[in-house]
Amino acid sequence: METGSLLAGAGVLLAIVWIWFAVYYWLNPQLKNPDAKARMTGTCGDTMEIGIQFDRKHVAVKTCCWTDGCITSLNCIHAAADLAKGKSVDARLDIDADAIQRSIGGLPKEHWHCATLAASTLHAAIDAYMNIHHLDIEPSLNDNPPDGNA
Ligand code: FES
């Protein structure tokens, strides 16, 4: 094999790796110092994580999220993070599994647990923030779907 072919192959491989990293970090932006963070693993084995930065009025101004789950999990955790932006900690209960599944255009019943895990992860992050700042914590909504499949 010629040296030129080897170099071209190595260049293509490096380009693929670079594109993979760029897409990965574009899909999973990170906050350097989130005010609150939560990581939860569902019964399916998938893990989700949300980090949130708040302003002085306890409004979520920046969020980041991550999951090792399927594309539905990714959609749900991104939806939860997006729904939280611009909302105060008091509005956290409005962001439940139903709000998340509606924001992504609906979910089949077998993927409802993805929205439930995303909502639980978001609530855990906000509850952690409220604990740190000694804010009143009301009981979280029951995010379980009507059939209780979480
Ligand atoms: Fe595990 Fe969706 S398949 S959270």
Image: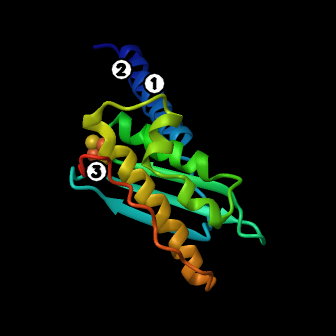
Relative vertical location of residue 110 with respect to residue 53 in this rendering, above or below:
above
| Sequence-first disc among 3 and 1 | 1
Foreground mark, 2 or 3, reads 3
Foreground mark, 2 or 1, reads 1
- Determine which residue is flagged by label 3: 46
Circles 2 and 1: CB atoms closer than 8 Å:
no
Which residue occupies 30% across, 47% down?
146
- Determine which residue is flagged by label 1: 11
Question: Ligand 1 within 8 A of label 3's CB?
Answer: yes
Residue 69 visible from this viewpoint: no
Relative vertical location of residue 53 with respect to residue 21 in this rendering, above or below:
below
In this view, which residue lies farthest toward the bottom? 134
- Disc 3 crowd, CA 10 A, few/some/many (<14, 14-19, 20+): some
Amino acid beneath label 1: Gly
Number of on-image labels: 3
Using the image as rendered, state which of residue 57 and residue 70 is in the foreground: 57
Relative vertical location of residue 85 with respect to residue 40 in this rendering, above or below:
above
Amino acid beneath label 3: Asp
